[in-house]
């Protein structure tokens, strides 16, 4: 059975986007980006909400953009090689290959995806992750903590959810970002 991993970049005060919806403060440098690539390389399926999908779909055409860093081209290949499932009630269609559209998050269906997957699955975006966390489906939580306090926005973790964690990995980067990986204790 594959693991379901929730992974996101956040501010030190625990937000994935600031109060204005911005996340330019979260852009990884090349060292962090290369590490993200290695963390994401084994992923077989991405689960996205509409907003996260709209942010991430740029990776489908990133290889067409001249002058990109090698880590960007590498990530574009990683992203394009994985399946994507987008959960949205407002999208009519999806624009990228290997992508399916689901109207609602069904915990039993996500469990079935985990059960039959040969590679790990990630849930992207704090709103969709909240559904998976509340359903007890998440096996690992990965957080890239950026050295910035943004004062408000969208929380990395949902309110009202409680679970125990066991530290699995940590890493500090030259730009002050800290990677934390925790296994969910069942």
Image: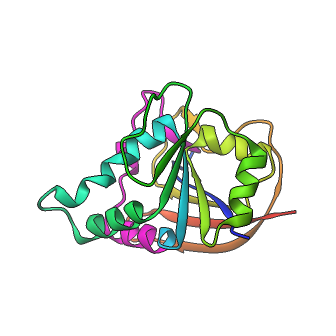
Res 150 seen here:
no
The x and y percentages for residue 7 are: 57, 57
- Residue drawn at x 17%, y 57% is 64
- Residue drawn at x 50%, y 52% is 84
Q: Is residue 15 above or below residue 170?
A: above
The x and y percentages for residue 6 are: 62, 55
The x and y percentages for residue 87 are: 57, 38
Instruction: Count how many numbered circles sit on residues in the image.
Output: 0
Res 134 seen here:
yes
- Residue drawn at x 53%, y 67% is 43
Corner quadrant of residue 138: bottom right
Q: Nearer the viewer, residue 77 or 36?
A: 77
User: Is residue 43 rendered magenta in the image?
Assistant: no
The x and y percentages for residue 94 are: 42, 39
User: Is residue 25 rendered magenta in the image?
Assistant: yes
Range of magenta residues = 14-38
Q: Residue furthest top?
A: 90
Q: Is residue 33 above or below residue 54?
A: below
């Amino acid at each position: 059975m594959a693991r379901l991993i929730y992974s996101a970049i956040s501010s030190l005060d625990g937000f994935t986007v600031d109060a204005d919806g911005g996340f330019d403060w979260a852009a990884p440098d090349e060292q962090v980006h290369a590490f993200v690539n290695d963390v994401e390389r084994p992923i077989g399926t991405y689960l996205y909400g509409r907003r996260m999908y709209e942010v991430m779909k740029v990776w489908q055409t990133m290889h067409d953009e001249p002058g990109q860093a090698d880590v960007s081209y590498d990530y574009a290949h990683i992203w394009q090689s994985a399946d994507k499932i987008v959960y949205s009630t407002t999208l009519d269609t999806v624009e990228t290959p290997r992508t399916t559209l689901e109207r609602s998050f069904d915990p039993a269906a996500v469990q079935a995806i985990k059960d039959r997957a040969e590679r790990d699955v990630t849930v992207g975006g704090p709103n969709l992750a909240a559904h998976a966390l509340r359903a007890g489906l998440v096996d690992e939580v990965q957080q890239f903590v950026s050295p910035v306090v943004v004062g408000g926005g969208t929380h990395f973790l949902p309110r009202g959810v409680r679970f125990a964690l066991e530290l699995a990995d940590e890493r500090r980067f030259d730009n002050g970002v800290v990677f934390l990986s925790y296994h969910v204790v069942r």
